[in-house]
Image: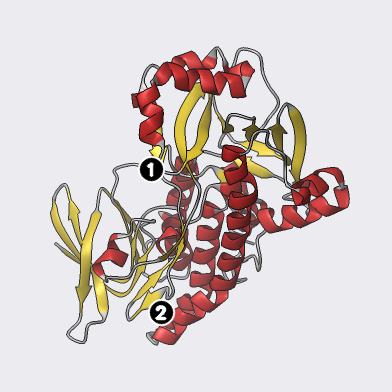
């Protein structure tokens, strides 16, 4: 089967679905291909930052958003060797969105997809796995090849957007490889039932032995233990009981919950990456989100920067798409808009990886680096990380023509 459209988006994550929604609101015909049959993925980020909440407001989706169970956090706390540290305080940001909230990404995607379906030019095809790209005689990308349960699918498009993640099929098909920036840790990812005794919201627990993160979700804690890079097999060899004991020593209140981990089948490896393409576009194709720049999990910025990419792409590309004048220069403009903020936050993450994560995994005992201690003790300094993490550099807003009345 062959479909013809103006824009084909490979990948139904936050960047892909939101870009499809924004373009469809402007009556650009869009096909979004998502390889899975649903959005339910534990590895997808949960953190919805103030910058993204501002965009939800722009789109008139706040009422729908607020009906979904989520966990607002006005502050990000860490416990370091038993001492609670208020690392980031979002209440210093302008109203109304002065908090980060934790929402399962599949719920956010369902909401955005439903909003997209209100527009006749929005077409989301689930269970459609992109397998390669189509090319014109001159080599320009002109769509994708995909595979569905019903058979092969060809999508012809004036523009292909690769929003298909850090293992992008579109990127691989074009022989484009991002530059890798080394990271010291991976994450062993697992879920735990909520402890019988409620505990304060805490995103990070750092002890002399380990570093643990816990994200509250409805009815359970999505948790991760930071481990030295490429050491997961060694942890598996120690056995699940040793792993459970390590978690319980880091957070004694989880000693009961951790019994739910019956084997390492309940623990998944999340390989951490920081990388970035030198060029986010080629003739006929644009890369956004993790396909252009993978982030580490630090501060949960990845989903929000992917969303910012989508907004910038819609703001720059809707008009030339409608006019039939789309050029490579338009695609380059999107990269120029988003590259500096991406470089900045990846550099910030690299500093955190080096000064906090690496030292937490190696030093005995661990001490927060001086800049982090100053931020935690001087309230006026907390404005800086709140803005860097909560808003980012050069935050995007939905163009006025898209904003809900």
Of the 4 image quadrants, the one containing the C terminus is bottom right
Label 1: how many Cα within 10 Å (few below 14, some 14–19, many 20+) = some
Q: In which quarter of the image is residue 363?
A: top right
Q: Which residue is drawn at the image coordinates 22% and 82% (left, top)?
A: 139
Nearer to the camera, 360 or 2: 360
Tell me if 365 is positioned left or right of 326 in this view: right
> Is there any visible trace of residue 382 in the rendered image?
yes
Residue assigned mark 2: 321
Secondary element under disc 2, as helix, strand or loop, is: helix
> Is there any visible trace of residue 41 in the rendered image?
no
Instruction: In the rendered view, tell whether residue 341 sits above or below residue 202.
Output: below
Of the 4 image quadrants, the one containing the N terminus is bottom left
Residue assigned mark 1: 39
The label on residue 114 is: none
Q: Which residue is drawn at the image coordinates 38% and 20% (left, top)?
A: 239
Tell me if 271 is positioned left or right of 72 in this view: left
Rendering colour mode: secondary structure
Which of label 1 and label 2 is nearer to you?
1
Where's residue 10, x and y in %? 33, 61
Nearer to the camera, 84 or 158: 84
Where's residue 255, x and y in %? 56, 14
Where's residue 272, x and y in %? 45, 48
Secondary element under disc 1, as helix, strand or loop, is: loop
Alpha carbon distance from label 1 to label 2: 28 Å
Where's residue 66, x and y in %? 61, 40
């Amino acid at each position: 089967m062959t479909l013809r459209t103006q824009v084909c988006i490979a990948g139904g994550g936050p960047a892909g679905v939101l870009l499809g929604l924004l373009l469809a609101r402007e009556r650009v015909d869009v096909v979004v291909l998502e390889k899975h049959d649903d959005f339910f993925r534990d590895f997808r980020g949960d953190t919805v930052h103030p910058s993204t909440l501002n965009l939800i407001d722009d789109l008139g989706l706040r009422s729908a958003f607020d009906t979904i169970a989520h966990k607002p956090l006005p502050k990000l706390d860490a416990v370091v060797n038993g001492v609670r540290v208020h690392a980031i305080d979002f209440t210093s940001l302008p109203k109304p969105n002065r908090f980060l909230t934790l929402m399962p990404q599949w719920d956010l995607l369902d909401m955005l997809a439903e909003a997209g379906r209100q527009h006749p030019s929005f077409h989301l095809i689930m269970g459609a796995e992109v397998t390669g790209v189509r090319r014109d005689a001159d080599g320009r990308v002109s769509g994708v090849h995909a595979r569905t349960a019903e058979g092969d699918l060809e999508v012809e498009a004036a523009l292909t957007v690769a929003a298909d993640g850090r293992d992008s099929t579109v990127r691989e098909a074009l022989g484009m490889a991002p530059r890798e920036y080394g990271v010291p840790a991976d994450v062993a990812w697992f879920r735990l039932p909520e402890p019988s005794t409620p505990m304060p919201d805490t995103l990070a627990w750092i002890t002399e032995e380990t570093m643990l993160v816990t994200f509250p979700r409805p009815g359970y804690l999505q948790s991760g233990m930071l481990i030295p890079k490429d050491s997961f097999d060694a942890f598996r060899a120690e056995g699940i009981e040793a792993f459970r004991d390590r978690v319980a020593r880091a957070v004694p209140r989880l000693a009961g919950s951790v019994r739910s981990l019956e084997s390492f089948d309940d623990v998944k490896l999340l390989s951490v990456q920081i990388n970035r393409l030198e060029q986010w576009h080629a003739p006929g194709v644009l890369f956004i989100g993790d396909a252009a720049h993978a982030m580490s999990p630090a501060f949960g910025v990845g989903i929000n920067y992917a969303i910012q990419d989508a907004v910038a792409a819609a703001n720059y590309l809707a008009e030339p798409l409608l006019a039939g004048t789309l050029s490579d220069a338009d695609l380059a403009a999107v990269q120029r808009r988003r590259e500096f903020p991406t470089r900045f936050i990846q550099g910030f993450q690299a500093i955190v990886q080096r000064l906090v994560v690496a030292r937490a995994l190696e030093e005995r005992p661990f001490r927060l680096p001086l800049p982090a201690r100053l931020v935690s003790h001087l309230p006026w300094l907390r404005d800086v990380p709140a803005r860097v993490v909560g808003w980012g550099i050069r935050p995007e807003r939905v163009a006025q023509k898209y904003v809900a009345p």
